[in-house]
Image (cartoon, rainbow, N blue to C red):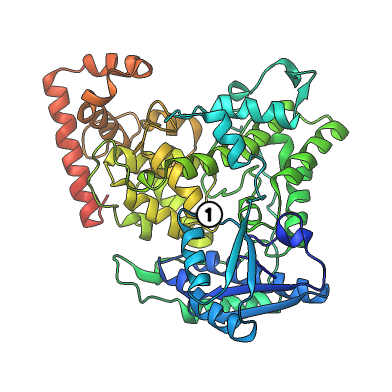
């Protein structure tokens, strides 16, 4: 029996490896083919390959026999393994990606081996428990799931009731920081020799060569590599967040500041999604700090909700809604993704700043993803699969199980299985929650005219285009009452402005 560790399951804390003896054989296959499927940000590839190689070395230092293969395909790696260990039986945690288990099983059985898939223990909520909770419903309500998981884990609960008397503190967590706000410096993990070797190799091996337009593998403009790629670094990243950024995480979690890419965000999605951290230890370390230091409940609850609420919810809605979710397009959006998502070349200050951050480090925080990048794609009418592909390629923490429900389900409302209404907003929201608009070439207070912020005309045009689908939604009643106030001339001017915006986007002049 051999424990097969897949590249995003780098853990000895749970799963088959946690139950294996230290002298048992471990198989790890570093397959380059996955890295050629999309024009991934170089830092994403460095995260994956460096973390895998460090994990290999850590296992060997602990006495494990590690069968490590650097090959083009998983099939090549399995060929090499079964040549040395014919008729071997493998055990691994079930992979999170849709259809991945079936593909791996076929590869193994074709080579005369056997494979057993253990439950994916990298999450708090099992598939069986989610099925029991969700039943036969096609739509999933996040708040109900979050409360169920709070009750079952006991996190932030007191005798069956939520600590503080409220389940969430959203109303306290929508503040914009004042001029005196000085966000803590993020942790930066200096690459060691192994990571430097991977950085150089990735730059040589995966530059360009992609068939799909527009920019192949050379679209990014990577800066210094800063992400944790070992268990030790992941624990240091967790400690740094809890010590320095957690106290003010809540109030400013929806704020956006020009050239401030971290604010008080956790920056833990990379090690979580690689398996270097477990959500249980992340939450329990947070709760320990809350008890020890009497941290603001709004910050603690807001972060706990992201980990055991949204992350767990996305994992299971993806599992339940696939494969249809990947191609869902409930609003019949049919426009191509504007090139500035890859280049950052736009006069729109918000998009230029956020895309610039993505090009540099493969990251922006969640509210920028939702209310700048996804919001623009939603209003513009980008095909859901196109914007999902971009997120999957562009972000260091992106995996298909993560991006697909977040982007297609929430971001561009391609499916109504996760949200009852689209997250659509005009420039008014961005002006309230960011400092982008002050120095922007476009006016957030204008809807039409060449200097008007594109978000405004696109917002109203979005409501008009999708009126048949959205007006009947009772949560959209107020915004449609404002649409009703616009006469035919105003609506025509909005449509004309949207035509100008699309032309400018296509020519790279927006």
Residue 328 position in % (x across, y down): 32, 42
- Residue at horizontal 59 percent and vertical 21 percent from the top: 171
Q: Nearer the viewer, residue 310 or 320?
A: 320
- Within the image, what quadrant is residue 492 found in? top left
Residue under numbered circle 1: 363
272 lies above or below 428: below
Residue 203 position in % (x across, y down): 50, 77
Using residue 322 as the reference point, say whether residue 173 is left or right of it.
right
Q: Nearer the viewer, residue 180 or 240?
A: 240
493 lies above or below 50: above
Using residue 8 as the reference point, say whether residue 499 is left or right of it.
left
For label 1, the crowd category at 10 Å Cα-Cα, with few meaning under 14, some 14 to 19 and many 20 or more, is many
Q: Is residue 363 visible?
A: yes
- Residue at horizontal 45 percent and vertical 65 percent from the top: 40
Q: Nearer the viewer, residue 435 or 333?
A: 333
Q: Quadrant of the N terminus?
A: bottom right
SS for callout 1: loop
Q: Nearer the viewer, residue 22 or 271?
A: 22
Residue 161 position in % (x across, y down): 73, 17
- Residue at horizontal 35 percent and vertical 44 percent from the top: 324
- Within the image, what quadrant is residue 251 found in? top right
């Amino acid at each position: 029996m051999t424990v097969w560790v897949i590249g995003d399951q780098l853990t000895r804390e749970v799963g088959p490896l946690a139950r294996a003896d230290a002298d048992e054989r471990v198989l790890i296959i570093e397959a380059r083919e996955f890295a050629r499927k999309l024009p991934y940000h170089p830092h994403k590839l460095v995260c994956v390959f460096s973390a895998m190689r460090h994990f290999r070395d850590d296992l060997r230092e602990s006495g494990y026999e590690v069968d490590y293969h650097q090959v083009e395909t998983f099939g090549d790696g399995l060929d090499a393994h079964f040549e040395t260990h014919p008729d071997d039986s493998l055990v691994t945690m079930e992979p999170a990606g849709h259809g991945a288990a079936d593909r791996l099983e076929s590869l193994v059985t074709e080579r005369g081996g056997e494979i057993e898939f253990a439950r994916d223990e990298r999450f708090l909520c099992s598939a069986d428990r989610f099925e029991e909770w969700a039943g036969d419903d096609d739509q999933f309500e996040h708040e109900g799931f979050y409360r169920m998981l709070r009750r079952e884990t006991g996190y932030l609960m007191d005798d069956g009731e939520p600590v503080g008397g409220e389940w969430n503190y959203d109303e306290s967590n929508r503040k914009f920081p004042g001029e005196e706000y000085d966000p803590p410096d993020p942790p930066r993990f200096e690459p060691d020799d192994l990571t430097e070797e991977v950085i150089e190799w990735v730059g040589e091996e995966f530059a360009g060569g992609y068939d799909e337009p527009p920019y192949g593998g050379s679209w990014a403009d990577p800066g210094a590599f800063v992400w944790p790629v070992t268990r030790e670094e992941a624990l240091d990243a967790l400690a740094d967040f809890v010590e320095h950024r957690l106290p003010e995480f809540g109030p400013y979690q929806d704020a956006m500041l020009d050239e401030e890419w971290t604010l008080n965000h956790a920056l833990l999605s990379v090690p979580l999604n690689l398996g270097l951290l477990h959500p249980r230890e992340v939450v329990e370390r947070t709760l320990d700090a809350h008890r020890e230091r009497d941290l603001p409940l709004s910050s603690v609850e807001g972060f706990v909700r992201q980990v055991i609420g949204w992350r767990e919810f996305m994992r299971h809605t993806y599992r339940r809604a696939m494969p249809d979710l990947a191609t869902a397009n409930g609003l019949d959006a049919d426009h191509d993704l504007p090139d500035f998502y890859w280049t950052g070349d736009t006069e729109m200050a918000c998009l230029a700043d956020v895309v610039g951050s993505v090009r540099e480090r493969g990251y922006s925080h969640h509210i920028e993803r939702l209310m700048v990048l996804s919001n623009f794609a939603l209003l513009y009418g980008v095909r859901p699969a196109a914007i999902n592909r971009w997120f999957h390629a562009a972000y260091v923490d992106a995996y298909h199980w993560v991006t697909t429900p977040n982007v297609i389900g929430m971001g561009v409302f391609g499916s109504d299985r996760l949200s009852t209404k689209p997250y659509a907003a005009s420039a008014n929201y961005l002006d309230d929650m960011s400092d982008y608009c002050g120095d922007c070439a476009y006016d957030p207070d204008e809807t039409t005219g060449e200097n008007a912020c594109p978000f405004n005309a696109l917002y109203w045009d979005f409501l008009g285009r999708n009126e048949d689908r959205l007006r009947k939604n009772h949560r959209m009643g107020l915004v449609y009452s404002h649409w009703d106030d616009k006469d035919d001339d105003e609506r025509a001017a909005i449509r004309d402005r949207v035509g100008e915006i699309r032309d400018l986007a296509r020519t790279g002049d927006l």
